Amino acid sequence: MPARLESDWRIHLAHVRGINRPRRRNVVGRELTFKKGEVSEHDGLRLTSMARTFLDLAQFIELRDLVAIADYLICEHGPEHPYPRAARLEMAELLDVVRRHPGKRGVKMARAALDLARVGADSRQESHLRLLLLDAGLPEPALDHVIRDEEGFAAAWPDLAYPDWRIAIQYDGEVHDHQVQYLRDIERNRRTQSAGWTEVRLKKGDLDGDRPRAVVLITEALRASGWRP
């Protein structure tokens, strides 16, 4: 979620037409219409489903953040991955909830976000980075790609990859500042290079500005590997 929404602790209560809007401190009342399966129960509370919540958020946030939410919901990794995970939702479930509400506010934004969503992004920053590269006219990077050594064993799992040019992209968040993770990153870089790949390491701030440093570094790496616009 965008930081401005993460820090908003107000509770949003939905009600159907004909019922008075909730009026309490730190409570926002919304008149909504639900289809079958769009309300679930958790610890005794009736909540909108994850798919419906995605659609409801579409009217409040910008496209890149909505793409990051869709990426988060559909992300999965197989058993070979160091951190296997199952998808919270299938893409079909998100497409279905959008299809069922053709006139809802924000539905066009939701459709656009699902067109750009991809399986395999582990963080909001990875989703934003992928969109930055596309906006800059660079090829679309692969997600969840496995780099293998000469014997065919898995050597590294880059955040994003350009297999045709053997370029691995890693976004190092704050957790990578810790000593243990730092040493793991060095070992990962060695395995990547041993497999004949170039690793581009990015850090916080490289995605900011009108000309993000991430785009510059990745463009240079692609050109050095033979890519041309």
Image (spheres, rainbow, N blue to C red):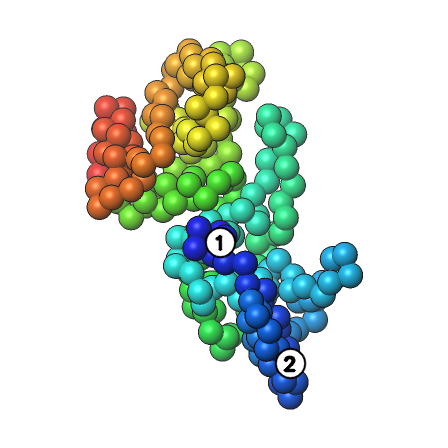
Q: Residues within 10 Å of mark 2 (few under 14, many from 20)?
A: few
Question: Residue pushed farthest right?
Answer: 44
Q: Secondary structure at mark 2?
A: loop
Q: Is residue 102 above or below residue 219?
A: below
Q: Nearer the viewer, residue 39 or 36?
A: 39
User: Foreground mark, 2 or 1?
Assistant: 1
Q: What's the residue at 29%, 48% (across, down)?
A: 135
Residue at which label 2 appears: 16
Pinpoint residue 119: horizontal percent, then vertical percent.
52, 44
Picture mark count: 2
Question: Residue pushed farthest bottom?
Answer: 18
Quadrant containing the C terminus is top left
Q: Is residue 195 visible?
A: no
Q: Is residue 149 above or below residue 76?
A: above
Question: Residue pushed farthest front?
Answer: 25
Q: Residues within 10 Å of mark 1 (few under 14, many from 20)?
A: few
Pinpoint residue 207: horizontal percent, then vertical percent.
32, 39
Q: Going from the N terminus, do you reach mark 2 or mark 1 first? A: 1
Q: The disc labelled 2 sits on which kind of residue?
A: Val
| 45 relative to 205 in the view: left or right | right
Pinpoint residue 174: horizontal percent, then vertical percent.
44, 31
Q: What's the residue at 43%, 55% (across, down)?
A: 4
| 41 relative to 68 in the view: left or right | right
Mark-to-mark CA distance, 2 and 1: 27 Å
Q: Mark on residue 214?
A: none
Q: Is residue 88 visible?
A: yes
Q: What's the residue at 42%, 41% (across, down)?
A: 125
Q: Is residue 94 above or below residue 123?
A: below
Residue at which label 1 appears: 7
Pinpoint residue 208: horizontal percent, then vertical percent.
29, 42
Q: Is residue 158 above or below residue 191?
A: below
Q: Nearer the viewer, residue 175 or 195?
A: 175
